[in-house]
């Protein structure tokens, strides 16, 4: 009889745990949570928000607007580390890493969960991502290799016949159908809890960017599938003009991915391809910046910052310091 009573007190496991990591941009974060809650569908969802030391009243506003969400607070430890802090409290059978700058336009979370339930080897999935203007974002990606980074450095992705050489999937048809993929931009990434536990969570060495690339590769290697599901469309409110610190961090994260997964020779080749990419773009944008147009000045500064990052031996510490110093003005993670 006591054993039966104990079982009765065990709370039911939620179908889904939604994790949102916030750092300022309060109104967008509120809109993200409102949108996701409205699109939950008929499943049991728990909501976990980890606020990374926002200087805006982000955490307070979320606590007031969404008392059903569990609010966690901490230092700005980076997206991967903050996600892991929240995931440690997640009880759901499925887990959603959701950017705080996403609104759901079509579909429900229940549909995605239901689809994963039907495919027991599906470890992770993402959905159609669009810009605020409605343009399709190239969120389906191939794993980075020196050849693919070189192809993008040379602008092959802009030539229809050569698009398959780069990292981005630029065929719009691919976004309208379900299919297994290498990895997806992590603005929306739903995971099977069992699969995440099998590969050990996010690698916290990735302060920002490439943590989803690394995770998806580890899932593939462990025998799990990663898929694009067209049954949901989200708007990803990316940050607009580039931020030099983020450009540096993005390229550093690719270098870190290469060092971890590609071996010394290929990692060096990937680094050389990144140097070429940013050097070529800096040469193109720097003269245009002399016109005084802010657009070209920003692009030139980002390329020069990224080039400096991939050339420096202590790029990791440099990029992270610069990112944290300018994070309040970064305008978004992706």
Image: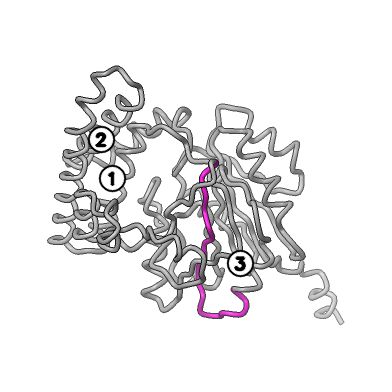
Q: Is residue 292 above or below residue 329?
A: above
Compared across the picture, whether 126 is left or right of 111 comes to left
Q: Earlier in the sequence, mark 2 or mark 3?
A: 3
Give the crowd class for mark 2: few <14, some 14-19, many >=20 residues within 10 Å: many
In which image quadrant can residue 4 be found? bottom right
Residue visible at 71% across and 58% down in the picture: 40
Give the crowd class for mark 3: few <14, some 14-19, many >=20 residues within 10 Å: many
Q: Nearer the viewer, mark 2 or mark 1?
A: 2
Residue 317 pos. (x, y %): 28, 38
Residue indicated by mark 3: 94
Compared across the picture, whether 62 is left or right of 177 comes to right
Q: Secondary structure at mark 2?
A: helix
Residue 27 highlighted magenta (yes or no)? no
In which image quadrant can residue 264 be found? bottom left
Q: How many marks are shown on the rendered structure?
A: 3
Residue 218 pos. (x, y %): 38, 68
Toward the viewer: 293 or 49?
293
Q: Indicate the quadrant containing the C terminus: top left, top right, bottom left or bottom right.
A: top left
Residue visible at 39% across and 61% down in the picture: 171
Residue visible at 33% across and 44% down in the picture: 250
Residue 120 highlighted magenta (yes or no)? yes
* Residue range of the region highlighted in magenta in the rendering: 116-132
Residue 34 pos. (x, y %): 71, 45
Q: Earlier in the sequence, mark 2 or mark 1?
A: 1
Disc on res. 251:
1
Q: Nearer the viewer, mark 2 or mark 3?
A: 2
């Amino acid at each position: 009889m006591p054993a039966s009573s104990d079982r009765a007190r065990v709370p039911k496991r939620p179908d889904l745990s939604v994790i949102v990591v916030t750092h300022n941009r309060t109104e967008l974060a509120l809109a993200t949570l409102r949108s996701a809650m409205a699109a939950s569908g008929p499943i049991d969802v728990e909501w976990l928000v980890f606020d990374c030391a926002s200087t805006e009243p982000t955490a307070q506003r979320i606590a007031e607007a969404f008392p059903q969400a569990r609010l966690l607070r901490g230092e700005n430890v980076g997206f991967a580390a903050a996600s892991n802090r929240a995931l440690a409290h997640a009880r759901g059978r499925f887990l959603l890493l959701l950017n705080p700058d996403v609104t759901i336009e079509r579909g429900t979370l229940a549909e995605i969960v239901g689809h994963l339930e039907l495919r027991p080897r599906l470890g992770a999935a993402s959905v159609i991502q669009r810009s605020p203007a409605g343009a399709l974002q190239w969120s389906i990606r191939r794993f980075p290799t020196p050849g693919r980074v070189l192809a993008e450095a040379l602008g092959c992705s802009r030539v229809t016949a050569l698009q398959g050489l780069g990292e981005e999937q630029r065929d719009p048809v691919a976004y309208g159908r379900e299919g297994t993929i290498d990895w997806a931009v992590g603005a929306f990434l739903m995971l099977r809890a069992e699969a995440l536990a099998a590969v050990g969570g996010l690698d916290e060495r990735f302060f920002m960017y490439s943590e989803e690339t690394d995770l998806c590769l580890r899932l593939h290697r462990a025998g799990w599938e990663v898929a694009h599901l067209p049954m949901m469309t989200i708007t990803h409110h990316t940050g607009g003009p580039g931020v030099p610190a983020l450009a540096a961090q993005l390229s550093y994260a690719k270098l870190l991915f290469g060092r971890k997964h590609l071996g010394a020779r290929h990692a060096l080749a990937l680094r050389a391809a990144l140097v070429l990419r940013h050097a070529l773009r800096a040469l193109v944008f720097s003269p245009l910046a002399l016109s005084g147009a802010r657009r070209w000045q920003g692009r030139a500064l980002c390329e020069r910052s990224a080039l400096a990052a991939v050339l420096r031996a202590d790029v990791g510490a440099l990029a992270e310091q610069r990112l944290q110093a300018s994070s309040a003005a970064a305008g978004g993670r992706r």
